[in-house]
Amino acid sequence: MAKEQTILLVDRETDFLDWARHQLQGQVGRVLQETSSDTAYKTFCLEQPELVLAEMNLHPFSGIELLARIRRHSPNAMVVLTSAFGTTQSVIEAMKMGAFDFVRKEQLPFNIRVVVDSALKASAELRSASAFKPQLTVEQHQEDIVGRSEAMQQVFKMIGRVAGSEAAVMITGESGSGKELVARAIHNYSARSEKSFLAINCAAIPEALLESELFGHEKGSFTGAHTQRVGRFEQSDGGTLFLDEIGEMAVQVQSKILRVLQEGEFSRVGGDRTLRTDVRIVCATNKNLEDEVVRKTFREDLFYRLNVVRIHLPPLRQRADDITLLAEYFLQKIANRKHSPPLKLSEDAIRVLETYPWPGNVRELENTMQRAAVLATADVLLPKDIPLGHPAQETACDRDFCACPPDKDQLLGALFELAATDPSLPLLSWAEREFTVLAMRRTDGNQVRAAKLLGITRATLRKRMERIGSE
């Protein structure tokens, strides 16, 4: 690295500054140090260093504000922010406002030289390029997307980078990993945030109805079309449309989606009038669409239109650092709905949660916490209070029931006998709750499969789970 390059370190702790300076000796020409954000900004304006490495928690104003002032002064400035307590929102905001990177402080001992080297190389390239317009407006949003693992930090950074663009985004990951939450975060941090965000699950709507759901239909266009219907593309004009499980979409509908992406035009089912819409498409899939393209079940041209930016959500079993954080977050959400203190997790309960493989991912963890909150008899959750849907926990009674299930009359008779033994038992609401919890356990927390098992829609199941969790 060229000796004339300069780096500015900003941190309230002088011990950290001395350590970082020692680590970077020989890698850069000069290392400047400041302990406050106001003096750091003055030093930046005077010295124009190639890189600023700044802590988030500064005085008299924060590292985010320091980043904003530096970027206003020098749009090509290279800034890396650090923090011991980086939140989802702070990471996304930092990346949206043009930070080169956001690094958790405990990671710096392992990669400070790599981070600085990468940033300085990018700085050299940017200094020879024309200035670009920075994004300075920070929207405040509270997301349900939570994580402190390195894998999720990378996801947050990608959200921050793509939110300000108009590029189509494809989110991949296993079912239940939180793909819709990422899509909402992209919308909320974009220039379209004041407009609509609409989500549609392509796998949950019959093929014959999906085209009408997306594009609308004219009155009388098919049997049952008694009135004109406005589709999701019209409803989300100016906003964002999230197409979940897009790999399940029929090829005929794919063709119309492609036309919208290419021309911004479509027609309602049964109509001949061309309509225009300005919609940003974010899609998600748990399939390998490259394989679907080879099988000719997904259009290659549509795939490349949708796959401009890809964000992959890792399964929960690959980010064990997030499990306890998420569990406590869900317990807090349940407590907020019930206006009561949150349940606590015992150390043994935490060990159980962190060693379980979570085949249903974050969705299964949330449902598990909801069930635990319903069944809890104390304010601290023990392992026995956490109903995990693992096949090994299937009882002999479960297996016998599956092998020789009673007929409907026997089953209904048993339910009424149970109600007769306890006159205070609200039979219908109790049965609804028990069947819902059992369906979620038997499907490992997969809401699509559980809804199918219960004979209801996924939306109805979600509402039912929220109601059960708030009781």
Image (spheres, rainbow, N blue to C red):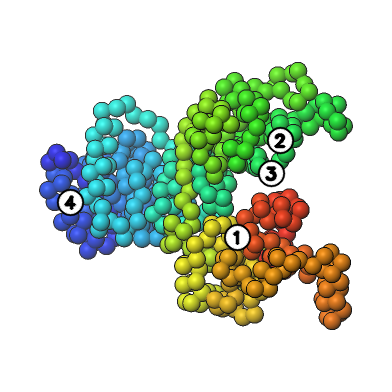
CA gap between label 4 and label 1 equals 49 Å
Residue found at x 86% / y 30%: 223
Label 2 secondary element: helix
Label 1 secondary element: loop
From the image, tell me which residue sits under label 3.
204
CA gap between label 3 and label 4 equals 55 Å
From the image, tell me which residue sits under label 2.
207
Tell me the kind of residue under disc 1. Answer: Asp
In the image: residue 301, left or right of residue 233: left
In the image: residue 241, left or right of residue 163: right
Are the residues tagged 3 and 2 within 8 Å (C-beta)? no
* Residue 36 x, y percent position in the rendering: 30, 56
Query: In this orientation, which residue lies closer to the viewer: 62 or 333?
Result: 333
Query: Does the image show residue 90?
Result: no
From the image, tell me which residue sits under label 4.
24
As displayed, is residue 298 above or below residue 466?
Answer: above
Query: In this orientation, which residue lies closer to the viewer: 235 or 96?
Result: 235
Query: In this orientation, which residue lies closer to the viewer: 330 or 403?
Result: 403
Give neighbour class at mark 4: few <14, some 14-19, many 20+ (Cα, 10 Å).
some
Query: Does the image show residue 453?
Result: yes
Query: In this orientation, which residue lies closer to the viewer: 44 or 318?
Result: 318
From the image, tell me which residue sits under label 1.
444
Tell me the kind of residue under disc 3. Answer: Ala
Tell me the kind of residue under disc 4. Answer: Leu
Q: Earlier in the sequence, mark 3 or mark 1?
A: 3
Q: Which of marks 1 and 2 is nearer the N terminus?
A: 2
